[in-house]
Image: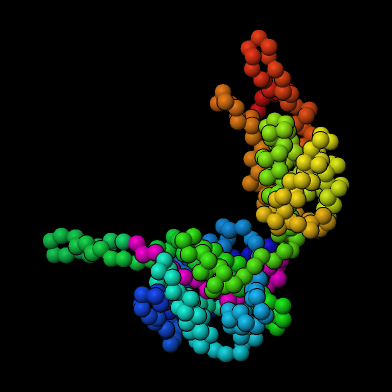
């Protein structure tokens, strides 16, 4: 787990990168920005808040030829091993971004490059490289007292409420296999430029990746196969059983998972067919056994909506600790007189 609470921003360089296609140029700062005590908490919130609110999915640098050809990886390696001053590295990062800013849709903006110290990853201190970019400008008003009236000036500036693009590179010193990378991109119109061209990263297929993707696959199977074949209750029941399996086991084994979550034997070949068709989408082609990441299970469970919404504007929320409770406390039936389905719910007392 990543903890940014005590993270410190050091050696902050601010550059302006224009759109190369429009000939807007680039402005490179020679000296670092002197962060005041008033600036520090505001900048920390501006840079790091989006990463606290985003799913913690790690990426790694990649390149079709060799990792050493990924320019940002090389620059990150220089930071990790103190190969060159930050002033020179930050300029190289800004120039690399400018060189890639050749599409008309790419907006000019300020680029902030800094060292990040005292990040915690699984309770271990880790340093990193922060690269952030602000693009969207907003109008704001400033007021000043005149002799007989309050004067108003309208200006444009960067809102501290929203960071447009960012990357945190965890620079473990001496790494030969690359670094872990986190990114955010609030503006999707040019995401290829930031993620693929500049960062050039791919997801790390670790336990977190495998756990999340397989549960997403289960969500898809429940919606696309279980619901049409059975009903909403069975869809929710299958998902709850899936989460229960992941929460109660340290390792995933697919045949055991199928035996414990799918009661209808007719759905077993449907599950296998669905995996064959959809595995590339969820990137689980070869996943039949893997270690389960429990924090990832808890994170995915929070997103799971175990609800049945009826056309009579009634919603049944099945917030069970055990998936078997759905069979014990809820029954579905058909009323011949009303020609309608019904749910029968059992309880001891009202809360």
Q: Residue at x 61, y 85 (%)?
A: 78
Residue 105, position in %: x, y?
Answer: 41, 66
Q: Is residue 282 left or right of residue 151?
A: right
Q: Quadrant of residue 197?
A: bottom right
Residue 185, position in %: x, y?
Answer: 51, 63
By what rule are the colours in the image chosen? rainbow
Q: Nearer the viewer, residue 180 or 115?
A: 180
Residue at the outermost top position: 337
Residue at the outermost bottom position: 84
Q: Can you see residue 129?
A: yes
**Quadrant including the C terminus:** top right
Q: Residue at x 46, y 70 (%)?
A: 133
Is 298 included in the stretch rendered in magenta? no
Q: Nearer the viewer, residue 105 or 9?
A: 105
Q: Is residue 265 above or below residue 133?
A: above
Q: Is residue 339 left or right of residue 325?
A: left
Q: Residue at x 15, y 60 (%)?
A: 149
Majority SS type along the magenta span? strand
Q: Is residue 184 above or below residue 233?
A: below
Is 122 included in the stretch rendered in magenta? yes
Q: Can you see residue 298?
A: no
Q: Nearer the viewer, residue 49 or 324?
A: 324
Residue 339, position in %: x, y?
Answer: 64, 14
Q: Residue at x 79, y 58 (%)?
A: 286
Q: Which residues are magenta?
A: 116-138
Q: Is residue 44 left or right of residue 121?
A: left
**Quadrant including the N terminus:** bottom right
> How many labels, in total?
0
Q: Nearer the viewer, residue 322 or 148?
A: 322
Q: Is residue 252 above or below residue 304?
A: below
């Amino acid at each position: 787990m990543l903890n940014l609470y005590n993270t410190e921003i050091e050696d902050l360089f601010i550059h302006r990168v224009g759109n190369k296609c429009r000939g807007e140029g680039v402005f490179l700062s020679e000296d670092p920005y002197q962060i005041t005590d008033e600036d520090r908490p505001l900048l920390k919130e501006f840079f790091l808040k989006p990463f606290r609110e985003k799913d913690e999915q790690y990426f790694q640098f990649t390149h079709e030829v060799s990792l050493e050809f990924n320019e940002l990886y090389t620059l990150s390696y220089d930071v990790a091993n103190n190969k060159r001053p930050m002033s020179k590295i930050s300029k190289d990062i800004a120039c690399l971004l400018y060189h890639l800013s050749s599409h008309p849709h790419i907006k000019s903006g300020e680029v902030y490059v800094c060292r990040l110290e005292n990040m915690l990853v699984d309770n271990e201190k880790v340093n990193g490289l922060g690269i952030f970019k602000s693009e969207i400008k907003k109008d704001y008003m400033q007021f000043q007292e005149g002799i007989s009236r309050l004067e108003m000036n309208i200006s444009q500036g960067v809102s501290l409420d929203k960071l447009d693009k960012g990357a945190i590179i965890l620079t473990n010193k001496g790494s030969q296999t690359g670094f872990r990378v986190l990114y955010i991109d609030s503006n999707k119109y040019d995401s290829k430029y930031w993620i693929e061209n500049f960062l050039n990263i791919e997801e790390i297929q670790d336990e977190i990746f495998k756990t999340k993707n397989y549960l997403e696959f289960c969500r898809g199977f429940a919606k696309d196969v279980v619901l049409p074949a059975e009903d909403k209750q069975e869809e929710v029941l299958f998902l709850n059983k899936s989460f229960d399996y992941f929460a109660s086991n340290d390792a995933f084994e697919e045949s055991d998972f199928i035996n414990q979550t799918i009661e209808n034997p007719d759905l077993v070949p449907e599950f296998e067919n669905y995996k064959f068709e959809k595995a590339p989408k969820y990137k689980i082609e070869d996943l039949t056994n893997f270690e389960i990441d429990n924090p990832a299970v808890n994170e995915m469970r929070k997103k799971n909506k175990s609800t049945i919404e009826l056309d009579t504007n009634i919603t049944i929320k099945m917030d069970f600790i055990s998936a078997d409770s759905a069979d014990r406390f809820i029954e579905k039936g058909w009323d011949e007189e009303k020609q309608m389905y019904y749910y029968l719910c059992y309880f001891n007392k009202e809360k």
